[in-house]
Image: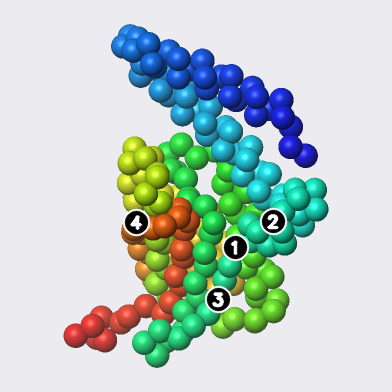
Amino acid sequence: MLDKKVLEKFNKEQEKLIGIIVRKDSLIAGVTYEKLLESLEKETVYLRQLISMCSSGFNEQCNLPDNKYDITIKSEQHNGKRRYILELPFLLPNRRSSKTNFKRTIVSDTHHSILEYCKKVHPKMIRNASVTFINYYAPSVHRKLRHDNDNTEVSAVLNTLTGFLIPDDNSLCCDLHIISREGEKSYTKVIVEERIDENEQK
């Protein structure tokens, strides 16, 4: 399943590009950064595909413990109202640069976890919902990799919630919030809860 040659190819390509950057060739620095970013994104897609396979029942081939990469979902009461909390063991990509395959693996992972959760728990759909995405960044994450919140690829996850935890993701029945916080590790938390009516805020 893991192709060592593929990873070696990425490493050689990235080492070459980093060498150009280190030599400070200002004429091609900008282009080189773009090429390096593209190579890293392709490698990320490849690794995400492996993770997706592992979390979809290939744990023996991956030599990973069960559910290592599963998305966790739980429900709780908060201020007298129910809410669902999903934790994704990865950061959502920048929608400006995220690749189709990367989005597919996110959708596949999330859909599989929600489907299994609904089979076991039969959760009640929240018809007037507030969905909050929280990006937790570990201290080691470089600031340049912390893209603006408005560029976070949330639609891939939001679409998988539709029909399970919320009836639709249109603005009439779903408020959307995206925030970022420092954390001990990098991951994404998604909170689906009943939204507060304007009259309740007064």
Mark nearer the N terminus (1 vs 4): 1
Is the C-beta separation of discs 1 and 2 under 8 Å? yes
User: Mark 2: which secondary structure?
Assistant: helix
User: Between marks 3 and 1, how big is the CA–CA gap?
Assistant: 10 Å
Residue 196's quadrant in the figure?
bottom left
- Horizontal arrangement in the rendering, residue 66 relative to residue 47 (left or right): right
Residues at marks 4 and 2, CA–CA distance in whole angstroms:
26 Å
| Residue pointed to by mark 2 | 55
Question: Could you classify mark 4 by the number of other residues whose Cα lies within 10 Å: few (under 14), some (14-19), or many (20 or more)?
Answer: few
- The answer to the question of whether label 2 and label 3 lie on touching residues, with beta carbons closer than 8 A, is no
Instruction: Give the mark nearest the N terminus, 2 or 3.
Output: 2
Local SS, label 3: strand
Mark 1 lies on residue: 71
The percent coordinates of residue 56 (x first, y second) are: 73, 56
Disc on res. 199:
none
Give whichever of discs 1 and 2 has the lower sequence position.
2
Quarter of the image containing the N terminus?
A: top right
- Residue lying at 40% horizontally and 84% vertically, measured from the top left: 78
Q: Tag 2 or tag 4, which sits nearer the N-term?
A: 2
Extreme residue in the right direction: 60
Residue designated by label 3: 74
* Disc 4 to disc 3, C-alpha distance: 22 Å
Q: Separation of disc 1 and disc 2 at Cα?
A: 9 Å
Tag 4–tag 3 contact (CB < 8 Å): no
Report the quarter where the C terminus lies: bottom left
The answer to whether 88 appears left or right of 80 in the picture is right
At 61% from the left and 44% from the top, the residue drawn is: 48
